[in-house]
Structures are given as C-alpha cells and as structure tokens.
Amino acid sequence: MTHTIRSCTALLAMVAVLLTAFGLFTTAPSVSAAKIGDLNADGKLTTTDVRLYLKSLISGGGLTASQQKIADYDGDGVIDTTDSRTILLDTISGRANEVIRGFWIPYMEVADLISSGNVATAKSKIDACLQDCADKGANTVYFHVRANNDAYYNSSVYTPTSKTKTLLNAGFDPLAYAVERSHALGMKIEAWINPYRIGTSIANVKSSNYFKFGSLYYYVPSSADVQDLVVRGVREVVQNYDIDGVQFDDYFYPRDSVSTTAAESFEQADYTAYKNGGGTLAVADWRRYVVHQLVAKCYAACHEREGCVFGISPSCDFEANYDSMYADAAFWAKNPGYVDYLAPQLYVGYNHAYTPFAECLADWDALTRHGRVKMVAGLALYKTGLLDDTWAGTNARYEWLNNNNMMARQVATTKTMHWDGVAYYSHQSFTVDSTRNATVANADMASATEAWLTFQ
Ligand SMILES: [Ca+2]
Ligand SMILES: [Ca+2]
C-alpha cells in the first residue's frame, strides 16, 4: 500500500510538472450535471480531472464557483491533493466510473439452493443461479448470508442454519463456493446482512439485549455487546471470504416500534448511561447516533481488507428512515467513514400515491454526498406483473399489471440522473408466483435485463 501511494505521489508530481507547461481549464460544468470530482464535466472521472485539480492547487486557486462545489471528492470540506490522489487511485483501479448491475439473492433463494443438504446438488444449483445472473448481464450479486441471527456460511459468531451445517460437515461451504463461482464468472459478490433482526425464535440468541416487536425479536441497537456482535459477524465474513463487500438491509429500529419521545425499557439503561456520561442528545437523535456508531464500525471492519466495500440498502422513504427507523441515510452519504454506496429500495411505481418513483429517485439523487459514495437504484423486479399493488393508492394499484415495461422505464429514468447503476430485487423473481401475471412479468423482466446493459 505504501509503495502504491509513493508511486502515485511520484506520478502526481510528474503530472504537475507537465501542467506547468499546458493550460488546461475548460468550460465550467453545471453542478447539477456533474459528478463530484468531474471538473471538466464530461461525465467521467479521469486523469484529466486530476490534472485540473493539480493545476488549480499549484496556481493557488482557479476553480470556478461551480467547480468548487463538486471538487471535494472525499467530502472532508477541503479541496487538496488528497482529493486528486484519491480520484487518481479510483481511476487506476476502475472504481471511479464503475457501473453496477446487481441482483439481490435473498435468503429464501439461498435456502432453496442448499435445501437438499447434498453437496453435489447444492453446487449444481449455486452454479445455475450464478450462471443465470451472469447471463442476464449482472456484474454484482448481493448474496444473503444472514437474515435472522443466523449464517449461511461457516460462522463461529452466529449459528449456521441447519442445512448450512449439514453441508459444512460434508466439507462444503456455500458462501466460499458462491464467491469462487461469482469471481470465475466475472462478477463481484457482496455478503448481504440483516444486522438486528433475530426472527421468531431466540433459540440461538447471542446477546441478552433483545426486544420483541410484533412476532419478531430484534437486537437492541444501543447495546454495546450487540454492536460488538454485529461487528464481529461482519469482520469474520470480510476476513474469511474473498467477498467484494458487505451490505446491510433496511432494517434498523423496526418501523414504528418505539416511542419517538422517550426511551423504551429495553434501552433505558443505555440512554441513562449516555446522559450520565454528559450526552445531551434527545432520545430520537441518540438512536440515530447509536446507529451511526454501528455503521461506522462496520465500515471500518470492511475496510480492514483492501478492496472490500460497505453499503446500505435503505427503504425509499426518507421520513420513515429518519423518524421511525433512526436510519439517517443523508448523513451517511455526506460524511466520510460510513458507507461506500447506498442502494435505496425504490420499490414503487410512477403513480404511487405517497412515494412516486420519479420523485423518490430525484430525492435520493439530490443527496449531498462525498465523491466516493456511489448510488445504486434498487428496483422492484418482484412487482413486475403484480396483480394488485394493494397499498400503492387508487391510481397505482394496477400499474404493474397494466404495464409490461416498468423496469426498462425505471432504468431509463435512472439514467437521466447521477446514479452509478441499478440492482434488481430479486433474482428469485424470475420464478413467477400466483400474485403476478406471468405474461406481463416475463415481458417486463426481459426488458429489464436488456435495459440495464445500456447503463453507462
Ligand atoms: Ca472528467
Ligand atoms: Ca477533500
């Protein structure tokens, strides 16, 4: 790593020398059309942008006001050689302009892949699933490894599911195999985790700090030993598997599970300790703060291995995220040290009564983000052909049934903004159940896997 930085510093010095000979500023970009760091507004981050940075730094200024707004690539509030160096590293590694086409592979599908408990069958089903993802144009898969306080891999922190155990005892690790196969097919694979959800049973609970809401148990987000548990679970997948990242699902505090103005009994001791230690935050802000703490620790655990990123897939509803689940996605986008990307779940149609797709997409697109944060639009492949989107409002209930090109349109809308790619929820949706019209769904899904290939 040190060697790489030295090499880059030397390269930057050479570029700087060249710049003294050539004037390079081009027309000022429109801020709304520019990626952060894209000083010449050509839509890409390249060494040209790095040269423009260096020229401005050497000459002691020279950035236009609009360039200044998009120049702080690492989001630390200062425009300096760290920004140009980071862009250069991202450009060399291909990360800067990387387009994401992802499939979520949810635990229900993972459970099916390994349901036989037989190694040859599990291998064959994982092969077929990942081959299909690759054939459909994916370059990334989000593979569920923990949905309910469990593990679909060889874990010493959580209890592997019974079928996972059977396969592990036979010498076969489904996650290790999925990683190997994904990479062989040229795809990245990220481990997808629900950090707090325990499920209907506390049989394998790993901390006594949990609570029940509805029929489900959850770990207490403010608990120090819960945070330690979640981080150890992240660290073991990062260290033991050649995964390309870890993604958290949208479950933070369960929606509408807690009083917005007073600590619940399960968190009262933590909140009191915080206040006794001089903390001044009201309970709602304190909950967001404890979630931030966990997110920052998991980001750091992911970055203990080079090339491993950390992302979060929040619900599309900003207010519900912030006010009810205490998940402040805008904060994570803006401040370094929390996420490498956000993949909001924009699982709505254009006519949705409360969160129509284009408005949702624009709200997320408008987030202030430091330059390294990527944005991936999560799209509802599972709703294609849906007979009745019951809660979407009168004008939207049949939108997914009456249109067979929802995915292609949503990809096209996404391309008009500043997104780094799209991901479909989920790969399992290619098996159409009785809640969807198969003809409509299959046409829509065919358009989906054509449309995302045009994402650049
Ligand atoms: Ca550029
Ligand atoms: Ca900076």
Image (spheres, grey):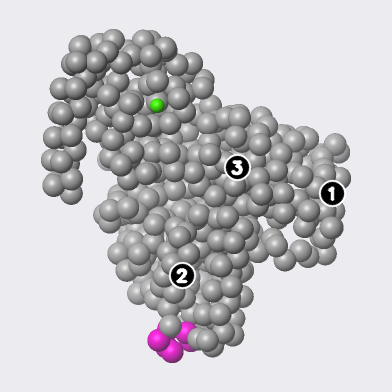
Q: Does residue 253 appear to the left or right of 79 in the view shown?
A: right
**Residue visible at 20% across and 12% down in the picture:** 59
Q: Does residue 405 appear to the left or right of 160 in the view shown?
A: right
Q: Within 8 Å: ligand 1 and the Cβ of disc 1? A: no
Disc 3 vs disc 2: Cβ atoms closer than 8 Å? Answer: no
Q: Which residues are magenta?
A: 166-171
Which residue type does callout 1 highlight? Leu
Label 3 environment density (alpha carbons within 10 Å; few <14, some 14–19, many ≥20) = few
Q: Picture coordinates of residue 396 (x, y %)?
A: 82, 40
Which residue type does callout 2 highlight? Arg
**Residue visible at 47% across and 33% down in the picture:** 330
**Residue visible at 42% across and 56% down in the picture:** 246
Q: CA distance from mark 1 to mark 2?
A: 35 Å
**What is the number of callouts on the image?**
3
Which residue type does callout 3 highlight? Thr
Residue denoted by label 1: 401
Marker disc for residue 181: 2
| Label 1 element class | helix
Q: Within 8 Å: ligand 1 and the Cβ of disc 3? A: no
Asked if the magenta segment contains residue 93, the reply would be no
Which mark is first along the chain, 2 or 1? 2
Q: Quadrant of residue 441?
A: bottom right
Front one among 387 and 54: 54
Label 2 environment density (alpha carbons within 10 Å; few <14, some 14–19, many ≥20) = some
Disc 1 vs disc 2: Cβ atoms closer than 8 Å? Answer: no
Residue denoted by label 3: 454
Which mark is first along the chain, 1 or 3? 1
Which mark is first along the chain, 2 or 3? 2
Q: Does residue 51 appear to the left or right of 350 in the view shown?
A: left
Q: Picture coordinates of residue 64 (x, y %)?
A: 36, 10
